[in-house]
Amino acid sequence: MLLLSRSDIRQLYVMKDCLPDVEQVFEENAKGNVTTPIRTAIGHEKYGGTTLYMPSYVESLDYVAAKVITIFPDNHKEGLPALQSVILLTETKTGQHVAMMDATYLTVLRTGASSGVATKYLARPEAKNCAVLGCGAQAIGQVQAVMEVRALEEVVLYNRTRERAIQFSQALRELYPDWQGEIRIVDDPNQAVETADIIMCSTKATEPLFDGARLRPGAHINAIGAFQPHMREVDLTTLRRSHKIVVDTVEGAQHEAGDLIIPAERGEWDFSHIYAEIGEIVAGTRPARESAEEITLYKSVGIAYLDTAVARSVYEKARKHGIGTDFCL
């Protein structure tokens, strides 16, 4: 079995690699080549954390993977990352467990790539202004992915604590030293939203972050932070104004997307208003954006087949380049 650390993976795999892998596996899912049970979430109320268990089999790749991810939002107080995860990768020709790898970096990368693919198909081609609501662990991957698919000129940051937004701004400048765009920090999320072509929500909010009436025509929203039924980042107005509501999977959205579950349970909205899964759009069976005025929403709760796809790619690159540590259990 090959052991791959985070530093090993960073040598091998970046957002440019991840985006096509994620796009391909979205299409494979639309074709029926993927088996992904609903993930199991175990809450740790005593410590304010969550552990997720996420298996998936991608038949066309001949790999199955299982990821275990912990999400402890207050870990920064202890100097620890909020997200920590590992992946066990198994090839399905003989059932050999071929790799164990750190998945914290990969989770940020593949979640960002999911939004990047959605942005590629749903945001206006000329979109140049991006609002980032929530500057935590996932936000950097969101920006990286959108940077790959759109020529951004401005990034507007909002975070509940302004200090985190300042730190995020500095991290962006270090990551993109040659980028000539502007970075602004605002104290009101509505300020960020009302000028944005692309809005990225990556928080642990339980109440909507902004007033959907403030969205400009043609805006695209990636809402990826609320991954449990009690969590919510977008309001009913946003749902009602969205011409196309696209999800990673309908099943996952029905079980975990509080943004949709809460208004549905109140009788204010219905799951029949979901336009498509993102894989259907990638596969070309449903149209993507059809006009400059459409408001589009991509709601993702995370899906395990993305982990299988990226883990397989990382493993095969590692074997090719002789990176990682072989060990026996």
Image (cartoon, rainbow, N blue to C red):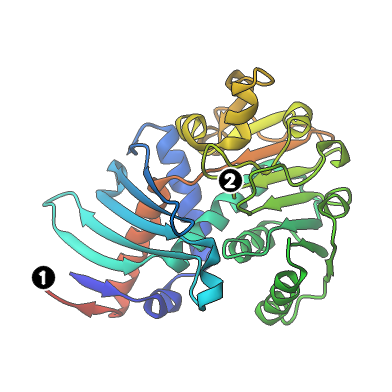
In the image: residue 295, left or right of residue 325: right
Residue at 50% over, 55% down: 20
Looking at the picture, does residue 182 appear above or below residue 294? below
Mark 1: secondary structure: loop
Percent across and percent down for residue 106 are 45, 64
Residue beneath the point at 26% across and 59% down: 88
SS for dot 2: loop
Is 103 rendered above or below residue 273? below
Q: Residue furthest front?
A: 46
Asked where in the image residue 113 lies, by quadrant, the reply is bottom right
- Looking at marks 1 and 2 on the same chain, the residue that comes earlier in the sequence is marked by 2
Quarter of the image where one finds residue 258? top right
Residue 85 in sight: yes
Q: Which residue is mark 1?
A: 329
**Vertical arrangement, residue 211 with respect to residue 189, above or below:** above
Label 2 packing within 10 angstroms: few (<14), some (14-19), many (20+): many
Residue at the (68%, 63%) spot, across then down: 147
Residue 14 spot, x, y in % from top left: 50, 69
**Residue that appears at 51% across and 42% down:** 228
Work out how far the residue at label 1 is from the one at label 2, CA to CA, in angstroms: 37 Å
- Amino acid type for the residue under numbered disc 2: Ala
Q: Nearer the viewer, mark 1 or mark 2?
A: 2
On residue 248, the disc is none
| Residue 152 visible in the shown view | no
Q: Which residue is mark 2?
A: 226
- Amino acid type, label 1: Leu
Q: Is residue 267 left or right of residue 199?
A: left
Q: Is residue 22 above or below residue 249?
A: below
